[in-house]
């Protein structure tokens, strides 16, 4: 009788461990899937940039340095895709430089009227919105996964099987500064 009871308890413990382990695996895979979503939109933006640079180059010959910087940052973005912190930093720099490009475009009325440029600008704007949405989804999945990894009793299982917290795709210092400025302006 005691042996049967002990076997039932051991079986229950094994089932609970398996359920917790599978939950951690499911959460980790959701984080990986969400990162792949960000990656898709970053690649989409990277694919749009050469077309944008070519279009602007035809009109804004004096902006060679800015266009070269955008190209350099695009390459840096491509090379950083495996590291979340490097990707966030490269994303920030590329966003700043693209904003500079759109500010420069204001000096070229013919370019602002160019249908190809307007379409590229619209596509880039839509892509930026999708990147922001993908970042929110990713960070929500990271939050859920990290909570699972750190919560008792799953933290015991996560420690035994080597599950580690995932990194959030955080706003960069310049993005936080922009937010602070806009909040201060409301006061």
Image (cartoon, helix red, strand yellow):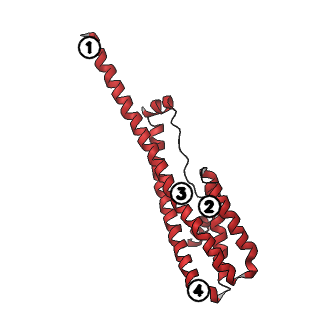
Q: Are marks 1 and 2 in contact (CB under 8 Å)?
A: no
Q: Secondary structure at mark 1?
A: helix
Q: Earlier in the sequence, mark 3 or mark 2?
A: 3
- Neighbours of disc 4 within 10 Å: few (<14), some (14-19), many (20+): some
Q: Are marks 4 and 2 in contact (CB under 8 Å)?
A: no
Query: Dot 4 corresponds to which residue?
Result: 114
Query: Dot 3 corresponds to which residue?
Result: 39
Q: Is residue 26 left or right of residue 1?
A: right
Kindly report the distance in space between the C-alpha atoms of the residues bearing marks 4 and 1: 80 Å
Q: Position of residue 145 (x, y in %)?
A: 46, 44
Q: Secondary structure at mark 4?
A: loop
Kindly report the distance in space between the C-alpha atoms of the residues bearing marks 1 and 2: 59 Å
Kindly report the distance in space between the C-alpha atoms of the residues bearing marks 3 and 4: 30 Å
Q: Is residue 186 visible?
A: yes
Is residue 2 placed above or below 40 in the rendered structure? above
- Residue visible at 41% across and 34% down? 21
Q: Earlier in the sequence, mark 4 or mark 2?
A: 2
Query: Dot 2 corresponds to which residue?
Result: 91
Kindly report the distance in space between the C-alpha atoms of the residues bearing marks 3 and 2: 11 Å
What is the number of the mark on residue 4? 1
Q: Earlier in the sequence, mark 3 or mark 4?
A: 3
Is residue 103 placed above or below 92 in the rendered structure? below
- Residue visible at 55% across and 85% down? 115
């Amino acid at each position: 009788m005691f042996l049967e009871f002990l076997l039932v308890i051991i079986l229950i413990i094994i089932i609970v461990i398996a359920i917790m382990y599978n939950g951690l695996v499911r959460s980790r895979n959701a984080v990986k899937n969400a990162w792949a979503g960000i990656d898709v939109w970053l690649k989409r933006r990277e694919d749009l940039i050469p077309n944008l640079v070519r279009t602007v180059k035809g009109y804004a010959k004096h902006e060679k340095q800015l266009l070269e910087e955008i190209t350099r940052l695009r390459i840096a973005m491509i090379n950083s895709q495996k590291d979340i912190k490097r990707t966030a930093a490269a994303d920030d720099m590329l966003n700043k430089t693209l904003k500079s490009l759109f500010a420069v475009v204001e000096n070229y009325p013919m370019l602002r009227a160019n249908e190809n440029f307007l379409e590229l600008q619209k596509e880039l704007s839509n892509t930026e919105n999708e990147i922001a949405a993908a970042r929110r989804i990713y960070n929500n999945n990271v939050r859920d996964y990290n909570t699972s990894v750190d919560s008792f009793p799953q933290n015991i299982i996560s420690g035994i099987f080597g599950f580690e917290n995932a990194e959030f795709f955080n706003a960069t210092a310049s993005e936080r500064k922009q937010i602070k400025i806009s909040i201060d302006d409301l006061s």
